Amino acid sequence: MTTTQEPQRIVLAGVHGYGRNYLPVLRELTAEGVATLVGVCDLRPVPADMLAGLGDPVHGSDLGALVRETGADVAVIATPLHTHTTLGLAAMEAGAHLQLEKPPAVSLAEFDALREAADRLGRVCQVGFQSLGSGAPERVRSLVRDGAIGTVRGIGAHAAWSRDTAYYQRAPWAGRRRLDGVDVVDGALTNPLAHAVATVLALDGGSVESVETELYRAFDNETDDTSCVRVRTSGGLAQGRPLVVAATLAAAEQQPPVVTVHGDGGSISYWYTEDRVRLTRPGSEPEETTHGRTVLLRDLLSHLAAARDGAVEPAPLLVPLASTEGFMRVLESVRTAPDPRQLPAEDLPGEGGARRRVIPGITDVVTEAADQLALYSELPRFAALAGRAA
């Protein structure tokens, strides 16, 4: 990215958690003269070595005040889930555009409030679903449009990850549905594996018409760690056929998540953490491609620079806030669903004294659900697993 404009001024909210992942790209943008970190918003002091190469940003705990004080063009919000809306509204009211981590909000009402404020104030908001910055989704859509797999039967995603008790002990909000009367919705489908849901919906591109959820847990938490959801849309790639996401954080071994478009003449699989696409058709060798990925903060800054220059029409954002409405409808269904049911699980040693929970056979279940476009409760394999004595 090159520019003759003044560097865009950035405030980063939430440095000690996920926000630390923004520091490398901020260093690159600073060195390129594209951006400058003018403020850091965090409830805890930030050690100087964390900000090496980033100048001398102002520190503060009030994001709105910090945006006003620094004249920030962009606020990067990488704070706990249930703070996104409050901080996003404060930053936009103070004059900043947003790079907002996922999920954008923890209820549909909060999402609507963010969208209304962005429209009213003329702010731009990009949501941090990094998988949608890849060139791979367009490759998948192009193959489908070209008839590479015939008629689409549906889209399935399966994700088998492994977490331990330390993961849920890292913050007071982790593993909670609500905290001090406030929605958190820190479930498998809405936080750690939210990309699987967002990617399936983005590939389909339709409007969500219905959502079915099944929520379970192996850990002793409020929220789900083993879940599935089936969505039907209108006007999308799947033409109203089912979209299924099956996920667990209680697998014996962690595997890369995969999204598969099932057709009557083959399938297209997308490993979204690896930007890898594979086309599989009967009688032919699989065709595999790997794709580049655009950093979403760079995309936002390019969009704003083009708008500020006025010489060219800004390219659309890769993940604008409005495009995540389908994801938020799924999140709302998870938020309002009954509490997750306990599943039998093995209690195993983790690292550093932590404990793992492993549901025997769950990786086969999530894979089958995605392949069959089925809910867990529709699979005999899951019925046997759920009925196993703890």
Image: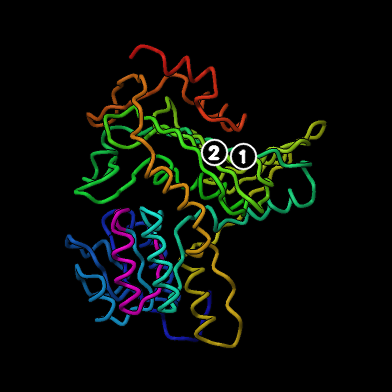
Q: Nearer the viewer, residue 67 or 213?
A: 213
Instruction: Residue 258: name its quadrant.
Output: top right
Coloring scheme of the render?
rainbow
Task: Write the residue at 26% across / 36% down.
Answer: 166
Look at the image and tell me in which quarter the C terminus lies.
top left
Is disc 2 in contact with disc 1, using a CB cutoff of under 8 Å? yes
Amino acid marked by disc 1: Pro
Q: Of marks 2 and 1, which one's residue comes earlier in the chain?
A: 2
Task: Write the residue at 31% across / 21% down.
Answer: 348
Q: Which SS does the magenta portion mostly show? A: helix
Residue 122: percent from left, percent from top = 44, 79
- State yes or no: residue 199 in magenta: no
Taking 166 as reference, is 294 above or below it?
A: below
Q: Nearer the viewer, residue 97 or 382?
A: 382
Amino acid marked by disc 2: Arg
Question: Which disc number belongs to residue 242?
Answer: 1
- Per the rendered image, the range of residues in magenta is 79-100
Q: Element under label 2?
A: strand
Residue 8: percent from left, percent from top = 41, 79
Most distant residue in the right direction: 283
Query: What residue is shown with label 2?
Result: 230
Q: Nearer the viewer, residue 359 or 386?
A: 386
